Image (cartoon, rainbow, N blue to C red):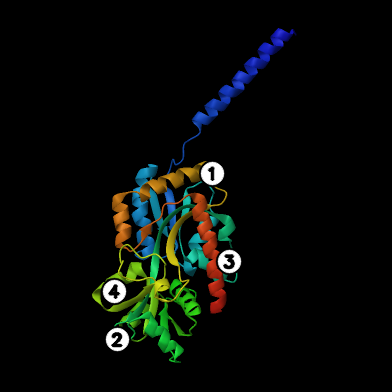
Amino acid sequence: MSSAALARRVFIACALCLGAAAWSASAAPAFPTKPVRLMVGFPPGGGVDVAARALGGVLSGELGQSVIVENLAGAGGNIATDRVVKSAPDGYTLLFGSIALSINPSLYKSLSFDPVTQLRAVAMVSTSPYVLLAGAGSGIDSVQKLIARARAGEDIHYASAGNGSGSHLFMQQFADIAGIKMSHVPYRGAAPALNDVLGNQVPVVFDSIMTTLPHIRAGTLKALGLSSKKKSAIAPDIAPLDELGVQGMDSTSWFIIFAPAATEPAVMETLHQAINRSLKNPELQARFAAMGAEIAVTSMAEAQRFYESEVRKWAAVVKASGVRTD
């Protein structure tokens, strides 16, 4: 075969390969082509569920596919997390993660997964502070009075949603920083804990601003201070505890959407951009603000770094509390 004929054959073969590659790329379906499931590890009607459904409705329009919120409650969110970790890494099964996802790795003795390595943050959604609260009949009207009474030897009880819950560990962190001791009264959920503070059965509680703001405004609960250094836009009159002498207190509740770690970067980027566009929707921002949550638009890397820092922070608080769960 002449060199000219050989060159022609090579040219034709290369052209066919390039054409096949181009056809394959153009024929590959764009993500997403079917509904996306957003898993929530808590029951319908709670703060996590309400926020997920609010975002899901807007995100559906951005993706051009339905975003279906599924509730898999139980084990502090671990059942839903396990489902997402074990799902196909194709972007169609996501986790609407909350602060529990940063507490659980150190709280539970034997998890079937490692969220730090098996999940990746797709996008930050929002943050919201917790509030240190006293019942109206407790006689505690300031954080200084609470600390003074505890340091004077009074056995002050505090309610929480249960061992290892956010309300428990926020109070543990506060007590550690303030250098005081209080007695923990764990309940089976945030609602019964709050009810007993409202009924003056227990004097104080640490709870989310998302669920307690109506009681603060009604005067049935006294807000002693925010858990975050930054003031809340929805309740700017409540001072951060850091400004009230409890220096170093800077923790918030948060929502982040996660996907299985092996999800394709292109799919992650599509989801990330769609979520961030959704978070700029004025109606969605108003709904989150009404719940006491502030929208947080970040990069994927920033969201992941924030999550990993939260895991480290709460591991230290869990250790100090001495609480472990099977």
The amino acid at mark 1 is Pro
Report the Cα–Cα distance between label 4 and label 2: 13 Å
Eye-nearest disc, 1 or 4? 4
Q: Quadrant of residue 13?
A: top right
Measured from the top left, where is residue 307 in percent x and y?
51, 59
| Residue at the image point whose x is 51% and y is 33% from the top | 28
Measured from the top left, where is residue 189 in percent x and y?
40, 75
Eye-nearest disc, 2 or 3? 2
Mark closer to the chain start, 4 or 2:
2
The amino acid at mark 4 is Ile
Mark closer to the chain start, 2 or 3:
3
Q: Marks 4 and 1: in contact by CB < 8 Å?
A: no
Report the Cα–Cα distance between label 2 and label 3: 42 Å
- Figure check: 296 above or below 165: above
Instruction: Using residue 307 as the reference point, say whether residue 255 is left or right of it.
Output: left
Instruction: Using residue 41 as the reference point, say whether residue 20 is left or right of it.
Output: right
Quarter containing the N terminus: top right
* Residue underneath mark 4: 216
- Circle 1 crowding by C-alpha within 10 Å: few under 14, some 14–19, many from 20: few
Report the Cα–Cα distance between label 1 and label 4: 44 Å
The amino acid at mark 2 is Gly
* Residue underneath mark 2: 137
Residue 111 is marked as 3
| Residue at the image point whose x is 59% and y is 71% from the top | 109
Q: Secondary structure at mark 4?
A: helix
